Every structure is written in structure tokens, then in C-alpha cells.
Amino acid sequence: MSPGRPHVLQTALVSTITFAALMLLALVLAWWTWSWLGPSLEPRVQINAEPEAGLSVASTLFGSIARQQPTVATGLAISLLGVIAATGERPGYALIRLDANKTVSVLVGSEVAPGIRLAQVFPDHVILERNGVRETLAWPERGSSALPITPETGK
């Protein structure tokens, strides 16, 4: 063995490691330069703001799609006192006064009274279903109340 042989192997190993480190540095610099100075990414799929428009156009191709039944204001002598919104897996509730002596808390899908079912709960109204007809029960008007409010005179 010649005395210069280990020196050549050491030099080749150091040169290879230095070359690999420089290539890695070049890749990192190129990636950060492209991230900072490159063009911004555009989404490939555009989100449709109105999904109903596509359904209404396509509904005539293979027949008609089922629409929700229109709701009418209820003529029942009941009033809405409060709502509890649905969260995740939990359904919504409604607090409904049936008459002066009876107030009930009803789960969506349950019966409020015989023949009247709570179909949906919204923040400002509920939808009841009576004999297959959907009816809206909204919050009572602020100005209207069953008993007039009169200030006490203290006499």
C-alpha cells in the first residue's frame, strides 16, 4: 500500500459529502424561493355558490325533483315560547304553550298534541305538521300580549 492511498479515499469521501450537502442546500433554496416569489396557487375546483341552480336545471332531464311542501301560518291556539337549536347529533327542541295551563318541551319528530308533530326547529320559528300539511309557528309579536300591561298607581 502506498502512503497516498488513504489520503485519496478521504479526499473523495469529503468531496462526495460536500457535493451532497451543496445539492441539498440548492434544493432548499429553490423551494423557499419558489414559495415566496412564485405564483399563488389557484384552486382547481371552483365552489358553486348556488347549488340549487344546478339541481333546478337538471331536474327536467329525468323527471321532477321533490320539493318541500309550502308552509302556511298555523291557525292553532298555541304559542312558541322558546327554541333550542340542534347541535351535531342532538336534535332541536321547542318550548310550546298549548293553553294557559300547559307548556311542553317537544323534541323534533315528536308530537306536540294529538295529530300535530314538530317537524323542524329554526331560530325564529318552528314548523309543525298537522294532517300532512306543514304550518309555521313563529315568535309572538312584541307589541301583542294576552293581558294588557298597566302601570300600578300605588293606590
Image (cartoon, rainbow, N blue to C red):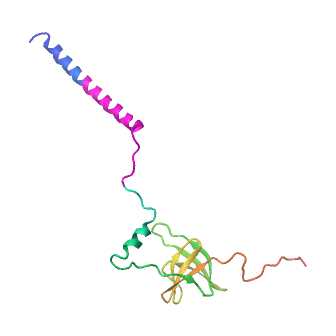
Drawn side of residue 50 relative to residue 143, left or right: left
Drawn side of residue 35 relative to residue 152, left or right: left
The answer to if 38 sits in the magenta stretch is yes
The percent position of residue 37, horizontal first and vertical second, equals 41, 36
Residue under the point 31% across and 29% down: 26
Q: Nearer the viewer, residue 52 or 97?
A: 52
Drawn side of residue 77 relative to residue 15, left or right: right
Residue under the point 77% across and 81% down: 148
The answer to if 37 sits in the magenta stretch is yes
Farthest left residue in view: 1
Q: Quadrant of the N terminus?
A: top left
Q: Nearer the viewer, residue 128 or 87?
A: 128
Residue under the point 39% across and 38% down: 38
Q: Nearer the viewer, residue 65 or 11?
A: 65
Farthest top residue in view: 3
The percent position of residue 125, horizontal first and vertical second, equals 58, 75
Is 87 above or below relative to 147? above
Is 27 above or below relative to 9? below
Q: Which residues are magenta?
A: 18-44
Drawn side of residue 151 relative to residue 144, left or right: right
Q: How many marks?
A: 0
The percent position of residue 107, horizontal first and vertical second, equals 51, 77
The percent position of residue 147, horizontal first and vertical second, equals 75, 83
Instruction: Name the image quarter holding residue 123.
Output: bottom right
Majority secondary structure in the magenta region: helix
Is 31 above or below relative to 68? above
Instruction: Name the image quarter holding residue 72.
Output: bottom right
